[in-house]
Amino acid sequence: MKILLLKFLIGGSTVAFSYIISKVIPWEDFGGIFATFPAVFLLSLVIAGMEYGNKFATNVCRGAVFGMTGGLISILVTWSMLSTTSNYALSIVTGFIAWFGSALTISKVVSLVHHAVAHKSLKHSSTHVK
């Protein structure tokens, strides 16, 4: 429970800080840069490593690659929708769907490629053993 509270406090503080930065600094994009600060990811990585070991932390990192790549796709979809429709609710929902769908798709594709390469490698090494 303490860890969940810590994640909430750090994540919420990061969001609040990005909002304050966007109001204080005249550069409009600066708040958006801070909005993508990976505080929750970094904290999750530290906690995963401390509680469950390096292998689990490595899996958290790998999953974060898929999620963060999906985050980029979400941003592009949300931005595109907002630019064309000016509908915040629709843009946010569409962006969320794009994030989730793309992160899962990327994860699945990477898994399939990994298994295909591993299978090819095993097949290749077994032909040289004979």
Image (spheres, rainbow, N blue to C red):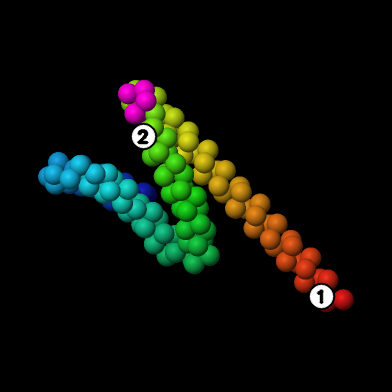
Identify the residue shown where x is 70% and y is 62%: 118
Nearer the observer, 103 or 45: 103
Residue 94's label in the rendered image is: none
Number of other residues with Cα within 10 Å of mark 1, as a class: few under 14, some 14 to 19, many 20 or more:
few
Image location (x, y in percent) of residue 60: 48, 56
Dot 1 or dot 2: first in sequence order is 2
User: Considering only vertical position in the picture, is 106 above or below 119?
Assistant: above
Image location (x, y in percent) of residue 11: 30, 47
Residue 52 appears in the picture as rendered: no
Residue 117 appears in which quarter of the rendering? bottom right
Number of other residues with Cα within 10 Å of mark 2, as a class: few under 14, some 14 to 19, many 20 or more:
some
**Magenta part mainly helix, strand or loop?**
helix
Identify the residue shown where x is 53% and y is 38%: 101
Residue 46 appears in the picture as rendered: yes
**Residue projecting furthest to the bottom:** 129
Write down the region rendered in magenta.
82-86
The residue tagged 1 is 128
| Residue type for callout 2 | Trp
